[in-house]
Image (cartoon, helix red, strand yellow):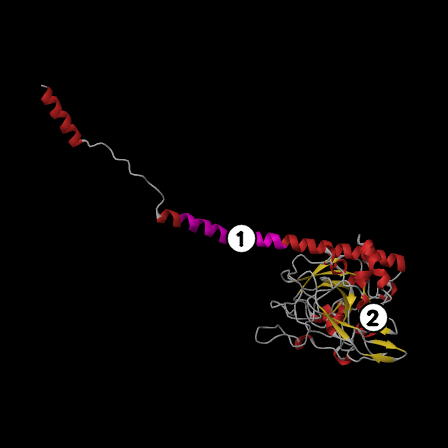
Amino acid sequence: MSSLRAMNRANRRRRFPPSVRVPRGLARLDVLLVLSVILLNVAIFLPFVQLGREAARRNQCKHHLNQIGIAVWNYEDLYKCFPAGIDVSPEGSYAGWGWNLKILPYMNAADLYNTIEPHFAGGIHGLPDSPEFRRRLPSLWCPSDTGGETVPHAMVVTAKVVDGIVSEGTEDWQNRLPHSSYFGNAGYLQLEAGGIQYNAAGIPTSILPLVNAGSLGHFGNNRSPDHRYCDQKLFGGFFGQNSHVALRDVTDGASNRFMIGERYSPVDSSASAVGHGTWIGVPDCTRAQGLAMALADASVRINAGMPLREPTTGFGSLHHGGAWFVFGDGSVRFISEKIDMTLFRSLSLINDAFLSW
């Protein structure tokens, strides 16, 4: 009997073998499926994240220009004129302190201004090589601009005029001047007076770079006591050499003319690069490179050097489709890069009498 029971148990074991637990894990197909879903989500949502960040940077840039507009008007309220684009004495060096330096006391940077003021008489080339003077100010910088903290190369002219006699000299300052993104509007120099046509500065490519970057410097390429600068009377904008434009000079209405705009930092960082900016001023008012460090002109279209960030003396930005501008009434508006050039040039002049058409 016991043997029969043993046989039955043996038969049951053969018919119903005990279950074997097999360890399980993620197969390659499962891993690939999960990764593909993750990558797909990244590809879909990453552009929206980038657009959101750029929108924030664009709004911050507008806020900076709002601050600048208020500061310029506070200066005007005190002195009854707008600051000169560059202050250059009849005798002395071919360099000048810029308009953006003069508004620092109205932008919560009076301490920095007071530190630089004792060096005014000595000119820019006498400015000490100090970290304080290389500081990039957030309120004078566009968050979308990809340039560095300082200007890679600035040709600082040491040439000067004494008793009508010109002495030559230039120094290459590497990373000594702080970068800035905002420029005073010098206006537009007509073709008949030595300017350029906007179609002479087409869209640059890697094969065909921007040949003519702008007009600044056309009237500053001769070192002489009388012929060495961007002349306010020739360009007709808010800012020029010793310009000091008063509100009464803006005969076509301050709200209809822009006085300050932004410009991207060019990718070229060589000593001859045109388009870098600094809030210190103009280290050389005889060349476009120096003048364009504080001023910009409307001879070329907005974003003329994009998308390659070619050198230009005009206006532009890394914001999509145009750039921000401060108008004469202090308002900040976005102007499309597709604006008609005749209209754009008209907006850059304080008086339509400068136009020949």
Q: Which residue is mark 2?
A: 241
The vertical placement of 29 against 286, above or below, is above
Specify the quadrant of the image occupied by residue 61: bottom right
Amino acid carrying mark 2 in the image:
Gln
Q: Residue at x 17, y 29 (%)?
A: 13
User: Which SS class for mark 1?
Assistant: helix
Can residue 85 be seen?
A: no
Task: Give the structural element (helix, strand or loop) at label 2.
Answer: loop
Say left or right for 43 vs 214.
Answer: left
Figure quadrant of the N terminus? top left
Task: Evaluate if marks 2 and 1 touch, with contact meaning CB atoms under 8 Å apart.
Answer: no
Which labelled disc corresponds to residue 46?
A: 1
Q: Position of residue 171 (x, y in %)?
A: 75, 72
Would you say residue 49 sits in the magenta stretch? Answer: yes
Judge by depth and name the residue closer to the eye, 149 or 41. 149
Instruction: Pick whichever of labels 2 and 1 is earlier in the sequence.
Output: 1
Q: Residue most toward the top?
A: 1
**Quarter containing the C terminus:** bottom right
Q: Which residues are magenta?
A: 33-54
Say whether residue 199 is magenta: no
Q: Quadrant of residue 9?
A: top left
Within 10 angstroms of label 1, few (less than 14), some, or many (20 or more) residues? few
- In this orientation, which residue lies closer to the viewer: 231 or 176? 176
Image vertical order of residue 194 relative to residue 122, above or below:
below
Q: Is residue 56 left or right of residue 96?
A: left
Residue 109 position (above or below residue 280):
above
Q: Position of residue 228 (x, y in %)?
A: 81, 77
Between residues 116 and 294, which one lies in front from this camera angle? Answer: 116
In this image, 324 relative to 227: left or right?
Answer: left
State whether the magenta stretch is mostly helix, strand or loop: helix
Distance of label 2 from label 1 (alpha carbons): 47 Å
Asked if one can make out residue 117 in the rendered structure from this viewpoint, the answer is yes
